Image (cartoon, rainbow, N blue to C red):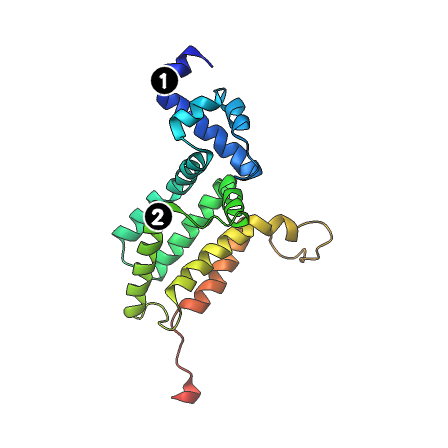
Amino acid sequence: MSTTRHNDPESTRNAIIKAAEQIFVEQGFAATPMSAIAVKANVTKSLIHHHFGSKKDLWNEVKRKQFSQFTGVQSQLLETSNMDAGLLKESIVQYFKFLQKNPQHSRFLLWMKIEADDTCGDMANEMTNLGLKRLQEAQEKGVFRSDVNPLFMLMTFLGLAELWFETKHQFLRPGIESGSEYDHTDEAYLEAMLEIFFKGVLPREPDPDQI
């Protein structure tokens, strides 16, 4: 370990977090030994314990870093704008673009699902509760259908975005006849996802036969 690293605790912490993030994304929490993180970060295992305590504490810190990359912008959007179809669409697009630019986040989420880790941390919980509150307010104003559970609405748009980045390589592989006349880019999926989602959550036009 370099003298500079030794004399700079913040640099050491950042190096450990970066190394842990890379290995956790590749191998998941359970299969990642602390020794591998130490080698990757060029530090001793005792130094990792000094800064973070246990491997679980380090995992939680990496998780906090992963979620903080997106929650700050999304929370600001939800706190400063009135919820309508335009804001919800912008929120969905932001999340999709974030996943597109940060493929490691999708892998991290997948490991959380595989290892049944349902603790997203206070930051993610606060943003989820804020999103639910804004959706409920919009439902009360008639912006969105009131007969749809807002939690399911939130889960649907998050799930649709995450599913694409988790599985697109399985469905676009050779041998799958997905139709050469269609565009299979990220942008094409996002457009289709928005079309499908918003046709379901916007208030329905009255059926003239039932008036």
Quadrant assignment, res 57:
top left
Residue 17 horizontal/vertical position (percent): 44, 30
Q: What residue is disc 2 on? A: 74
Q: Which residue is found at the position 45% from the left and 50% from the top? A: 118
Question: On screen, 29 above or below 150?
Answer: above
Quadrant of the frame with the C terminus: bottom left
Q: What residue is disc 1 on? A: 8
- Neighbourhood count class around disc 2 (C-alpha, 10 Å): few under 14, some 14–19, many 20 upward: some
Viewer-proximal residue, 40 or 183? 40
First in residue order: circle 1 vs circle 2? 1
Residue 9 horizontal/vertical position (percent): 36, 21
Question: On screen, 77 above or below 102?
Answer: below
Q: CA distance from mark 1 to mark 2?
A: 32 Å
Q: Which residue is found at the position 37% from the left and 71% from the top? A: 145
Q: Which residue is found at the position 27% from the left and 54% from the top? A: 81
Residue 72 horizontal/vertical position (percent): 33, 43
Q: Which residue is found at the position 41% from the left and 22% from the top? A: 12
**Quick check: 191 left or right of 77?**
right
Residue type at mark 1: give it: Asp
The residue tagged with tag 1: helix, strand or loop?
loop
Residue type at mark 2: give it: Gln
Q: Is residue 185 something that shows in the picture?
A: no
